[in-house]
Amino acid sequence: MKNSFILRNVKRIDGNSADIAITDGKISNISPAGGESEEHIIDFQNKVYVSSGWIDMHVHAFPEFDPYGDDMDEIGYKSGVTTIVDAGSTGADRINDLMSNAKDAKTNLLAFLNISRIGLKQVDELANLSWLDEGKLLQAIENYGDAIVGLKARISKSVVGPNGVEPLKIARKFSDDTSLPLMVHIGSGPPEIKEVLQLLKKNDVITHFLNGKANNVFDTGGNPLPELLDAIKRGIHLDIGHGNASFSFHTAEQARASNVHFNTISTDIYRKNRLEGPVYSMANVLTKFLYLGYSLKEIIDGVTVNAANWLRRPELGKMRNGQTANLTLFSVEDRPVTLFDSEGESRKAEQQIVVKGVVINGEYIAC
């Protein structure tokens, strides 16, 4: 549904009701609920929240790669996410194909460029340092700089092989040369997490920071490592990146108790963990943070305002007149659900977040 319509009686995160008018794909008016109009009306009867469109900072949206690949729209607008950020599925060799695919999708796409030119064609893409080709990386950035938001380096044992922390040192140089921040995947060592943290600078992203592996950012007593606290002071960005193996309820509870707060909530979603779990969808991941006791505002900020600001596209995190309409409609329902983390642990929640629809580039689609 395009052209002109009104989303009537939708709740904002502060609890106030509003009518949002969409005209020719843009937000044309936000007003108190219940005004008179002859335009097409979709009435949500004050049972549904509206926010700016959800942003998923960590997905794998290149369907040709297995296991880390999926369809853009399946993990995008169909699950309530209007902007996805591919987290290094492709390097310089295949970024052209990723961007070509985006032309056929409704969901908005941005991307981190893998520092390895082969991307996730192989899952040990940093085991051969000859694949870290700065010339090809620079050419890819020149070609697609409007869509590339940073560089991705997966720094864990299975990816780097015998190279330890060396790929991250190279990534640091690429980052400094291009002025693009790093998103760094953390996992099992070597390299040791302390080595990784010490190389990160302001605006770099640590993704998977709530993983339950031994090489994580908390000590055996559940306290944040001094190197993590130092990195936070330097201005690094903490991203969830749930994934198949990178989110632990136990670690998340340690983080909350230690007042180590996420900046963004992302899924690390791809075909397998969407269909078989434990991710399933962004709404399922957000429900886990509702269970953990975070406020609805904190949770939704993690997929709107905070993500948009990091991306240097603050307009994506706001609802205001005159901008392209990308909105997510959802409810918080009193409906029990069993939630699973990446360690096989479960928690029983009494509420869940449920997507009801999106407005994607001005088009309303019920979910």
Image: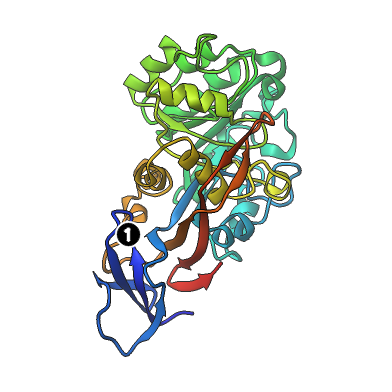
Judged from this view, the residue extending furthest toward the bottom is 38
Q: How is the image coloured?
A: rainbow
Residue at horizontal 57 percent and vertical 47 percent from the top = 284
Residue 64 in percent (x, y) is at 74, 50
Residue 66 in percent (x, y) is at 76, 44
Residue type, label 1: Arg
Left or right: where 116 falls relative to 206: right
Which sits in the foreground, 139 or 123? 123
* Above-or-below relation of 171 to 265: above
Residue 169 in percent (x, y) is at 53, 18
Residue at horizontal 66 percent and vertical 41 percent from the top = 278
Residue 113 in percent (x, y) is at 55, 40
* Residue 255 appears in the figure: yes
Quadrant of the rendered image containing residue 118? top right
Q: Which residue is mark 1?
A: 12
Q: Looking at the figure, which quarter contains the C terminus?
A: bottom right
Which sits in the foreground, 334 or 235? 334
Quadrant of the rendered image containing residue 312? top left
* Above-or-below relation of 319 to 145: below
Q: Residues within 10 Å of mark 1 (few under 14, many from 20)?
A: some
